[in-house]
């Protein structure tokens, strides 16, 4: 077999390895039941439980999907499942912390 014939195969293998290396690991979360209180909105609920600093709109979307509801139609006393994502620890090898990471150092025991 000629080397010219092997080049596309080698290129395809390298490309596959690069793509697989960039895949995100699945995010882990726990589900918590929250009872809607007077004055609560979906935004307020998810903002109060956003320990991993995720996009609130994404968390509201998951709340709607997990409960089969529209976020604007919450009722006082209603039980809703919310996703609580893991707090991501800063990578020690990176050597830098952002402002929220520094705050979390003082808040956590």
Image: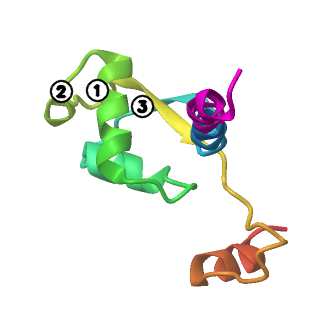
Q: Nearer the viewer, residue 54 or 33?
A: 54
Q: Nearer the viewer, residue 95 or 43?
A: 95
Indicate the secondary structure of the residue bearing disc 1.
Answer: helix
Residue behind mark 3: 35
Indicate the secondary structure of the residue bearing disc 3.
Answer: strand
Question: Furthest-top residue in view?
Answer: 68
What range of the chain is rendered magenta? 1-13
Residue 66 coordinates in the image, percent (x, y): 38, 20
Q: Which mark sits nearer the N-terminus, 3 or 1?
A: 3
Residue behind mark 2: 70
Residue 71 coordinates in the image, percent (x, y): 21, 34
Tag 2: Cα neighbours inside 10 Å, few (<14), some, or many (≥20)? few
Q: Which mark sits nearer the N-terminus, 2 or 3?
A: 3
Majority secondary structure of magenta residues: helix
Q: CA distance from mark 3 to mark 1?
A: 15 Å
Q: Is residue 90 magenta?
A: no
């Amino acid at each position: 077999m000629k080397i010219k014939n092997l080049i596309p195969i080698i290129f395809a293998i390298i490309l596959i390895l690069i793509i697989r290396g960039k895949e995100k690991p699945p995010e882990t979360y726990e589900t918590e039941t929250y009872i809607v209180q007077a004055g609560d909105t979906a935004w307020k609920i998810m903002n109060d439980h956003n320990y991993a600093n995720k996009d609130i709109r994404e968390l509201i979307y998951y709340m709607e999907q997990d409960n089969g509801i529209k976020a604007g139609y919450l009722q006082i006393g209603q039980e809703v499942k919310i996703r609580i994502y893991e707090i991501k620890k800063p990578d020690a090898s990176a050597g830098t912390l952002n402002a929220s990471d520094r705050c979390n150092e003082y808040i956590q025991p």
